[in-house]
Image (spheres, rainbow, N blue to C red):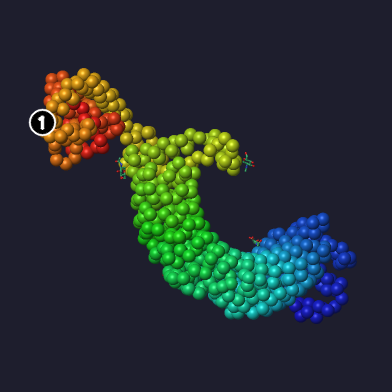
Amino acid sequence: MGDGRRRTLHAPRTWWQWLHLALVALVIFSLLSPATSICPSRCSCRDETLAASCVDAGLEVVPIQLNPDVQVIRLSGNRIANVHYTLSFYTSLRVLDVSQNKISSIGAKNFEAQSKLEHLNISFNIISTLGKDAFRGLRALKVLDLSHNQIETVERGSFKDSNAVQLIDLSHNRITSFEDPTVFKDITTLQTLKLNHNQIIDVPSLLLKNIPGPCALETLTLNDNLIEVIEDRSFPAPCSASLKVLTLGSNVIKEIEKSGFNTLHSLSSLDLSYNNLTYIPTQQLSKLNLLSYLDLSGNTFHSVKPVAFQSLFQLSKLKISRLPHLNWVDSRAFVDNIKLDTIHIDENPELHRMPTRIFHGNPHLSHVSLRDNSLTTVDVSHFPLDRLRSLDLSGNPFNCNCSLHWLWKLAQAESQLPLRDNFLNQGNETGPDIQPQLRIVVKNLKCASPESLADHLLIEIPESTVSCETTWLTVAIILALVLALFGATCVVLLLFSSEKRSSCWCRRKASKNGPEPESDGRRLASGLVAPPGPPPILMLMPDKHYRDAILSNYSMKGGHDSDMKLAEPWLNGDVRNGGNDYSPLDVTSSRSKPHVVYV
Ligand SMILES: *[C@@H]1O[C@H](CO)[C@@H](O)[C@H](O)[C@H]1NC(C)=O
Ligand SMILES: *[C@@H]1O[C@H](CO)[C@@H](O)[C@H](O)[C@H]1NC(C)=O
Ligand SMILES: *[C@@H]1O[C@H](CO)[C@@H](O)[C@H](O)[C@H]1NC(C)=O
Ligand SMILES: *[C@@H]1O[C@H](CO)[C@@H](O)[C@H](O)[C@H]1NC(C)=O
């Protein structure tokens, strides 16, 4: 049959058509009037848009009886085995989708008539080789999707004519290397090259080097390959300077040479996730001055050291998740990353604690996720809560004691705002009247201990289990303050009534002991009592146990040396432990500027 076809190639056009019509078992009507365009059953054709769609139509060949002016043909999900000779009818084609078929070869020169074709999708077929002249004639081609085939070899000259291409997707093939590193040498327009999921063992630096400058390449994806080392020369000019997005995830990278990334002056997004890095390549990354997205998840480093992301001043999104060995993040880890907006530190089973104030140097931080780690507690001071927009702490084995009261309260507030939720879910987060507010993930925010609360959701447990019994404490503080005020009033009254007597007495005493000190209470006091070390501080104890004793002291012993009273600690609000641990006289405290009172 194939031979027959070849022999009839130069036969009159009607014969050529007739053969193919027979091949696809067309109705006799169309055989009699070949110029009429026919829409095969299970296809839909729209003459007004010049588009034909035969998706999942069980076709085994490209239909040839469509409107010859058709611009869009969609044939995905059929059983088409090749595109040999069948496309020459459609010279106006702009879009051709033959993805998900059984094409094993695209042969040579089968697209010669498609000088207007811009979008060619041959993904999900079984092509193994791209031969010379495979895309001959595709001068307008912009998007070429060859992903999910079995391509091992890309021969010299495969892309010779396609010098307008912007995107080439060769992902999910079997490429180990490019035999001819100059295959893209005519494509000055190439912006995106996808090489994910192949068997590439080195960054194809020669390929990059041979793309003519000024290089337009902005995106290079190399996820799921077998790259072990990023070398100093992996990313050569001219394309190194234009590259903005680079993905190297799921390789086996264990080493990045010192200047491996030094040439990537424009890089803004870098994926190094799921490699074999045992350290954070701080120095290698530090040259990426424009980097705003970095993913280092799934590597094997143990800690995030101080200033681990040095000089990455533009970094706004950072992911360090799924690190099986991560057990420590330094409190100064992110100090250089002043633009940090979103951070994910999720699913790190060895991460049991976080340092306090870790994000306080990141004024733009608004989304924090610490999901599914092994944190047993989190201090409120970890987070700049006033700036945060979302916080996910779910899936940690929290010890639900009163250290988590703050989180309990935030979770309650979250679950009680369905109205706001509705509003926000409409996608308008910054409506006129609603301030952006902190969102807490309450689902799976659970307690692991104490045992009585194990596996309970934090929002479901009563407040008393996480409150720090502040009620009696508050009462005690208020009581102590009242007593202190009362005491102070007494002191002031006594001071007034004894001022004359006291100052006469002082002058008398001072003239005996030498020159009169400055009229400053403290100096006067040291002149009189002269204790070594810190200034003498005497304190009136605002506790009800001592109140009566002190007050009776005043009335009984007024005017004696040892009865100088300092009425300061409670005026500073310094009432420790609700006033219960005070000794009535505390002379060791060295508070600022004591207030000496004579009675
Ligand atoms: C090509 O087709 C596949 C499957 O039909 C689809 O997933 C893919 O997005 C298409 N590629 C482009 C570039 O449109
Ligand atoms: C990389 O890490 C994976 C999983 O951690 C491991 O199985 C593999 O042996 C490592 N490969 C190399 C080359 O170190
Ligand atoms: C609450 O539990 C955490 C973790 O076990 C512990 O570090 C913290 O000291 C506890 N807080 C209080 C107030 O007991
Ligand atoms: C959000 O609200 C603003 C002003 O109220 C409006 O201009 C904008 O279109 C809204 N956006 C969405 C996604 O609804």
Residue 22 sits in quarter: bottom right
Q: Secondary structure at mark 1?
A: helix
Residue 419 horizontal/vertical position (percent): 54, 34
Residue placed most toward the observer, 499 or 514: 514
Image x and y of residue 57, in percent: 72, 60
The residue under the point 50% across, 35% down is 417
Where ligand 1 lies, by quadrant? bottom right
Q: In the image, is 483 to the left or to the right of 67?
A: left
The single residue placed furthest to the right in the displayed view is: 32
Position above or below: 349 against 143: above
- Residue 488, how many percent across, how many down? 25, 24
Q: Is residue 382 above or below residue 130?
A: above
Quadrant of the image occupied by residue 188: bottom right
Q: Quadrant of the N terminus?
A: bottom right
Say which residue appears at 70% left-offset and 64% top-offset. 119
Instruction: Look at the image and tell me whether residue 21 can be seen.
Output: yes
At x 48%, y 47%, the residue is 366
Q: Residue at x 58, y 75 (%)?
A: 209
Q: Which residue is mark 1?
A: 512
